[in-house]
Amino acid sequence: MLHVSVSCGTYRKNFNPYYAREDWNTLVGTLGVPVSVDVRSTPLAGVSYVSSVVASIAHQFGHATARVSVFRYHAADVPTPINLDEYDVWTNLSSHPKLPEILVAASTSDNENFRAFCQENVFLVKRQPGPDHWLTTVPSSVTVLIEARSQK
């Protein structure tokens, strides 16, 4: 079984970096449409145990590419208290250009069992913080998504 570590400030939480494809498909809904999500119902739930998650969205860009963005409040970072953590979602790991390297790192092989596992799951990979990691507020485009969800 694959395990990785995700860090959030001084917090480290082990989690399975994969998510059942059926649950992911239910979460994201329509291809190309970003949606507000409850991060507590995902493998990234550990972030909500130590931070105040302000917003989280998921966006499936294409057949093999997606992203989850988590906006959390961190008082120590005032005047930019909103931290943006982003996760790439590999929805088609078996066609990933670095698959041979991934297989070596995971000490596994490209066999029927691995292919079945890839068909049943999507894989979450934390991105390095970018220049937009520290924000003064949650972007208005995200706020609109959250407000639309709360009105349903």
Image (cartoon, grey):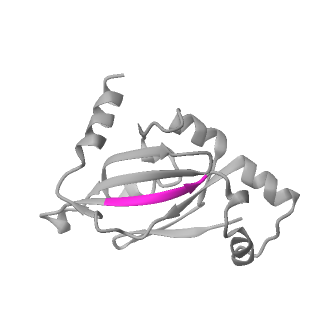
| Spot occupied by residue 45 in the image (x, y as percentages of width and height) | 46, 52
The residue shown at (43%, 40%) is 34
135 and 77: which is toward the camera: 135
Q: What is the quadrant of residue 80 in the picture?
A: bottom left
- Please give the range of residues in magenta: 84-90
Q: Is residue 93 left or right of residue 9?
A: right
Q: Residue furthest left?
A: 79
Q: What is the quadrant of residue 106 in the picture?
A: bottom right
64 and 47: which is toward the camera: 64
Screen quadrant of the C terminus: top left
Screen quadrant of the N terminus: bottom right
| Spot occupied by residue 62 in the image (x, y as percentages of width and height) | 57, 45
Q: Is residue 110 left or right of residue 5?
A: right
Residue 70 within the magenta-colored segment of the rendering: no
Q: What is the quadrant of residue 112 in the picture?
A: bottom right
| Spot occupied by residue 104 in the image (x, y as percentages of width and height) | 74, 77
148 and 75: which is toward the camera: 148
| Spot occupied by residue 134 in the image (x, y as percentages of width and height) | 24, 64
Q: Please count the marks in the image.
A: 0
